[in-house]
Amino acid sequence: MSTTLSEFPSPLALRERVPWRTLLLGFLLSFGLTLLAAAVFAAAFALGLTRLNDGRALPGVTVGGVALAGLDRASAEVRLREELPSLTSGHLTVRYGTVEERIEYSAIGRDYNMAAMLDRAFGVGRDGGLIEQAQEQLRVLLNGAAVEPSVRWDEAELEQRLLAIAQAAAVAPRDATIDRVGDRYVVRPSGEGRTVDVNAGLGQALAAVGALSPDDGVVRAEATSVAPAVSTADAQAFVDQFERVVAADLVVTGGNVVERVEAETLRGWVSLIGSDPQTWRVIVDRVAVNDLVGSLNEQVYVEPRSASFEWRGEEAVPVAGANGRELDTRASADAILAALNGRTGGGGSTRVSLSIVALEPAFTTAQARALAPRVERLSSWTTNYISSERNFFGANIQVPTRVVDGTVVGPGEKFNFWAIVGSLANYPEIGPGGVIIRGRTDPTGALGGGICSCSTTIFNAALRAGLEMGDRRNHAYYITRYPVGLDATVFKSGSSVQNLTFTNDTTSPIILRGINRTGKVTFQVWGVPTGREVTFSEPRIEDIKVARDFFEYSDKIAAGKTERVEYPTDGFKAWVTRTVTDEDGNVIHEETYYSRYIRVHGITLVGRSPGDPPAGTRIER
């Protein structure tokens, strides 16, 4: 029997014949199929688990240690609120400085951030694709998934409440103030304030509220002192300045004056003034100081006396003038203020010397001496009068004439009758005299009555010197001793004043010479000759109203006696023109003086006898 070899290759032979690439491909195919099977299994697992727990927490999920497996969202929230400790029942104790208050957790809405917690819990194992979900869910099944609780609160409300507590703890500083009580100043003390830094407690509050603990929290912040802008010492320093100013009397001297201003008076002069508490100043009332200086000046003042002239025959002889004196009121007041203000710093003075200045007269002795050889009489006028009760027996004419005598009127200066004569009450020699009241003569109805003889005489002398005339007024009725239309009355009656003025419009001083003689008064104008010529027109008289003369029966005088009380005087209008030319014939002044004189009927009183007509009955003479 013969043996033959099989034609089938041995396994080794076959192995040697299969290419390696084929083997590798087979292996990869097998592995891939295995993975695919695993993925299909995982997907099927995940899909199954997801469908099994659709809308429910996966097994193994906990929040804060509370298992939520198989619970839907609502049930999960219920379980969490049942098993987790409450975060709304506690409070914060806030101690800011000396103020302590509580903030209830419920007031700031402190609670679990339930929505976020459930979002995280129900999101476990549901993120990514099926493979990722399967892997995550498998991990959760094996190891569980713990979600940490979280807290929420109203931060704005918390901060607002902390701020309110801080404001309650804060105390505004109190500045020292000064009040005047009577004539003294009193300091109202200052006080320190305090403040709390809200941010210092805010961090503590956030940490306590954010902790997952139902325990109460504590927030502490110390108050900080706030100094006042004006301390008690600051205010007292100003009061001390005031007290130093008024602590002692002030003696004021000058000329023949020694005045002591007592400390109590100074208290009324001095004040503490300030627009705000940091700008107080010691102020001395300048008005009060000026009033003092003004009253002292009345005692110090001596009016300067201008040089004048007296006459030796027709020669003008200078009469020396004299300087006056007065206070330099501004400098004196400044000196008093400086002395008082100097006391604020502890210095100053208790004595002040007033500033006195010399007053030179308007017309000096030297000027009079220089003028005397050059002056001549430029004009003259004389008025005759009868000395009687109507002129206080001549005194009411003679006294003002004596006062005006020697008056010097400088170039461009104005002569003012009342400014020179002044108040008639200052002259004891002057008494009551005649006055025209409502067209009737009252023989003794006015102090100084009859003075118009002086003023009319001055007016006519000045007219004839060719000077520039000013205020002038005629009498109510014509008086025969005066030139027609050229009389000049003067009077003072309450607020009504009639003056006589003229201006020296020459280049040199003029001098008024008044001469009193029995029954006549004369005024002359002396000066450096100007070459002026003065002419007058004849008076133009119109509208004459003839006066009548009556007897009037009266019970005021003895029976059968008569007494003339009014002379008949015609009424009329008069115009007189004066023309003044210079040495070259040029007209300097030309004016017309108009006078309207009323009519006055003559009256002679007749004492009534039995059978005579009633008192007041008039019979024309």
Image (cartoon, helix red, strand yellow):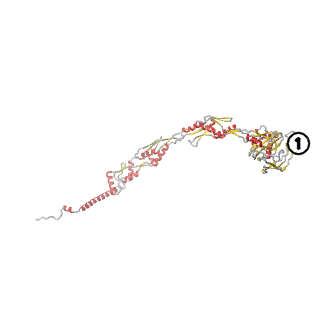
Residue 405 place in picture, x, y as percent: 78, 41
Can see residue 488?
no
Residue 569 as seen in the image, left or right of residue 179: right
Question: Residue 267, located in which quarter of the rendered image?
Answer: top right
Q: In this view, does 124 lie to the left or right of 556?
A: left
275 displayed left or right of 135 = right
Looking at the image, which is closer to me, 529 or 501? 529
Q: In which quarter of the image is the N terminus?
A: bottom left
Rendered position, 595 above or below 344? below
The quarter in which the C terminus is drawn is top right
Q: Residue 434, position in %: x, y?
A: 81, 42
Q: From this viewpoint, is residue 286 visible?
A: yes
Amino acid at the residue labelled 1: Asp
Q: What element carries label 1?
A: loop
Q: Of 281 and 416, which appears nearest the observer?
A: 416
Residue hosting label 1: 612
Exactly how many numbered labels are in the figure? 1
Tell me residue 559's x, y (percent).
87, 39
Relative placement, left or right, of 323 versus 136 is right
Look at the picture and state if 258 lies above or below 153. Answer: above
Q: How crowded is mark 1: few (under 14 residues within 10 Å), some or many (20 or more)?
A: few
* Residue 204 drawn at (x, y percent): 43, 45
Front one among 66 and 379: 379
